[in-house]
Image: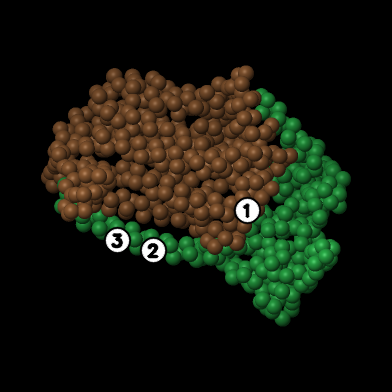
Amino acid sequence: MAHGNYSYKPTNAFTKWLDSRLPIIRLIDESVLAFPTPKNLNMWFTFGGILTFMLAVQIVSGIVLAMHYVPHETQAFDSVERIMRDVNYGWLLRYMHSNGASFFFIAVYLHIFRGLYYGSYKAPREVLWLLGIVIYLLMMATGFLGYTLPWGQMSFWGATVITNFFSAIPVIGESITQWLWGSFAVDNSTLQRFFSLHYLLPFVIAGVVVLHIWALHVPGNNNPLGIDVKGPADTVPFHPYYTTKDAFWIALFLIVFCYFIFFNPNFLGHADNYVPANRLVTPAHIVPEWYYLPLYAILRSVPDKLFGVILMFGAIFVWALLPWLDTSRVRSNRFRPFMKQFFWILMVVIFLLGYLGAQTADDSNLVFFGVELPIGKILLSRILTIYYFLHFLLITPLVGLMETPHAVPESISKAVLAKKGGAQS
Amino acid sequence: MKLKALLAIVLSLGLAGGALAAGGEGSLEAKHPKKVDWSWEGPFGHFDRQQLQRGYLVYKEVCAACHSMSLLSFRNLSQPGGPEFTEAQMKAIAASYKIKALDEKGEEVERPGIPADRFPLAYANERAARAANNNAYPVDLSVITKARHDGSNYVYTLITGYSEQPPAGVTLLPGLYYNEYFPNHQIAMPAPLTADDQVTYAPDAGNPKATKDQMAKDVVAFLSWAAEPKMEERKQLGVKVLIFLVLLSVLLYVAYRRLWRDVDH
């Protein structure tokens, strides 16, 4: 238990009996219902609940889809179309699942950036943060594996490009790649193992999510002020206060999600994936799913393949160092006038990298929403890649040392009262 | 580097295969398709039954000579949200095709089609299709409007966008036709709609005149439905789901505000 001395008390004979044998009601009560949560959490803190919900959506829709899907190179494409045409509400399941992946990633990016902004990775939440990175990596793998399953042109060529990353490893690269394929090229054995792993990984994610929540419940939630909870006046029980608030934000999230499912279901996909996989015809422009685009731009900014792959994975690994790279004593960017600016610069850099990742791989000038900029795409992606790493490796430690943060409130409840008083006067 | 070499080899094989039959003077980008106001766009969009029925006729009499629609069955023609031919009309359409089957002795015979049969293939296989088409492969049209960016507009513009003569200085490769809406501007498919009244629309059913433009729009409607046969069901359910979610959000918001009213936060 994080704060306060609350503990569950069984009330009747049965719950007393059960509590001394399997204290499961105690576990639920202490970790979900009564869990003391800072009372000043804003909407950016609801994405944990949204992500839990989305994981359930993906697992449930995926299990039903797997009842109808055929993981075979000659049948996979048609079996997906059969789900769309002949399975009752199959179109709903499939569009829910394919758009669900995108919305899962939208939520996870907002969740991660919220953690960055409010310093949720800083002590004592380093392990919580590291587990989050593990979940993100597992999500990346799951999303990639799932995208190959419809066995369209983008599925096939995406799988070819991504698995070829491993061939960059010196000496053993080729053996590893063939081991991943189960063959000498991406083919049926690759599809079957990708399906098997795509079914497995979400349950691994669910397991790490349990650890993530466990690691959250020891130090308790961070909050927009980034200060520790000082006492019961700073918190409310999770239920009903945050169950209600999260439910409201989940419903709003669902409105956007459902707009895409029902009215624009292929907007986030690529038309080429409705062309059956053909190993003799390479698509003019192989692009990964949007959620990999910034990393894809980092990969392509490097002329050497091995170094490109290292840099791409390094772009995520650098997050793991963040708790120790950040030298500031203050968590929340609310009180960090300089770091706050650098945070927004980083957001722009990541967005631009994503935009570059979606462009064709040539060195023409970047056309940004119809406006031609006087800078080549390769040069710009190199500058942005270097900046991305500098943000974590240089700017974060230096700004932490040099910046004078604003005064931090004494406690959450005092900050709240001050805000109220200020509003009245 | 090895990957790039692989991609280059694969790419050249694909082009040598004649799928896109590239011209010699380097690649030319396809022009953007024209925008058409289709009846099925937007959250309340729906297909025009008569148009889908006419579109089926155009597909059957023009496109089906070379293009298959392997994912469609005759039964789809009378399903809700589609052309909605009557049961009897749909069965008559099915029965007008001869389908290969086995009799009780295992001998190959031909029988009339039934609703559960798929649309017959235009060619027995890809090799036969290429042999008959100057080595170009007429693609399956089942999901064509989803398999191209801005698919409905693309197909409409492509089939109406042929030029009689290529511009001066452009030499067409043998067996190719000039069309600026296709990559490289050279396409192996001849213009499919060449004259008004190429397909005979029934005169009495309030059908418009079968101009080339009208036939193109009708067949695009049919292909768009075929690519997404549950579109009407999807959009109708979507409107209900969104109304529900908006009401739910309002209730949840009221509950949330009321609960938090007494908490300083």
In-front residue for pair B260/B203? B260
Q: Which residue is mark 3?
A: B251
Same chain for the residues under marks 2 and 1 in the image = no
Secondary structure beneath disc 3?
helix
Going 57% across and 63% down the picture, which residue do you hit?
B230
Residue A149 can be seen, yes or no: yes
Q: Is residue B107 above or below residue A417?
A: below
Identify the amino acid type marked 2.
Phe
Per the image, the residue denoted by label 1 is A79
In the figure, the brown chain has which letter? A
| Mark number displayed over residue A107 | none
- Total number of numbered discs in the rendering: 3
Q: CA distance from mark 2 to mark 1?
A: 32 Å
Asked if residue A179 is positioned above or below residue B257 in the image, the reply reads above
Q: Is residue A182 left or right of residue A232?
A: right
Q: Position of residue B54 (x, y in %)?
A: 70, 70
Give the x, y percent position of residue A412: 18, 38
